[in-house]
Image (cartoon, rainbow, N blue to C red):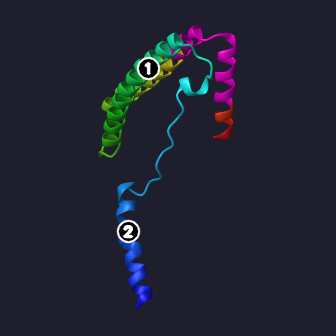
């Protein structure tokens, strides 16, 4: 009887917590550049925050557009018959959006590199390469 009660109690507590996360693990927050590079001046910090904020907003918008295009592609891929006249322009649009995302990320990198000293750039690049190796 006690075991049943304890198991019921555990499930009663654990199930709502599990449902909150939709069964997914919570994602770890990526460190911001201002947290990686240790010796940023106040001016650099403000400029870096502004550039990264603008870039994240732009990339988020592009990814939302890309998701809408991918959803359309998925819809037409599941339709019967030849949908190539509808699909091929969507494939092109999705590819152009990916190029825009890559271009935005590269331009952000260039803008940030202009703001940082050589030592700060080295610290940032070293940390980023270490992260890539861990993945």
Q: Position of residue 57 (x, y in %)?
A: 38, 23
Q: How many marks?
A: 2
Q: Position of residue 135 (x, y in %)?
A: 63, 40
Depth check: give the residue in front, 79 or 135: 135
- Could you tell whether 97 is left or right of 132 in the image? left
- Which residue does the image show at 40% across and 18% down from the upper left? 54
Q: Are marks 1 and 2 in contact (CB under 8 Å)?
A: no
Marks 1 and 2 sit apart, C-alpha to C-alpha, by 41 Å
Residue 56 position by quadrant: top left
Label 1, on which residue?
A: 55
Depth check: give the residue in front, 13 or 131: 13
The correct choice, above or below, for 30 with respect to 107 in the image is below
- Which residue does the image show at 61% across and 22% down from the upper left? 37
Q: Quadrant of the N terminus?
A: bottom left
The magenta stretch spans which residues?
Answer: 107-129
Residue 93 position by quadrant: top left
Q: Is residue 84 magenta?
A: no
Q: Is residue 124 magenta?
A: yes
- Could you tell whether 73 is left or right of 98 in the image? left
Label 2, on which residue?
A: 13
């Amino acid at each position: 009887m006690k075991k049943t009660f304890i198991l019921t109690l555990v499930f009663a507590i654990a199930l709502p917590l599990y449902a909150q996360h939709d069964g997914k693990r919570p994602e770890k927050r990526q460190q911001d550049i201002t947290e990686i590079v240790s010796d940023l001046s106040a001016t650099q910090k403000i400029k870096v925050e502004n550039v990264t904020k603008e870039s994240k907003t732009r990339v988020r918008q592009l990814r939302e557009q890309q998701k809408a295009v991918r959803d359309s592609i998925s819809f037409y891929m599941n339709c019967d018959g030849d949908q190539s006249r509808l699909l091929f322009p969507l494939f092109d649009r999705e590819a152009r959006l990916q190029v825009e995302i890559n271009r935005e990320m590269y331009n952000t990198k260039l803008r940030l590199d202009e703001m940082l000293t050589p030592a700060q750039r080295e610290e940032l690049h070293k940390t980023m390469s270490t992260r890539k190796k861990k993945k």
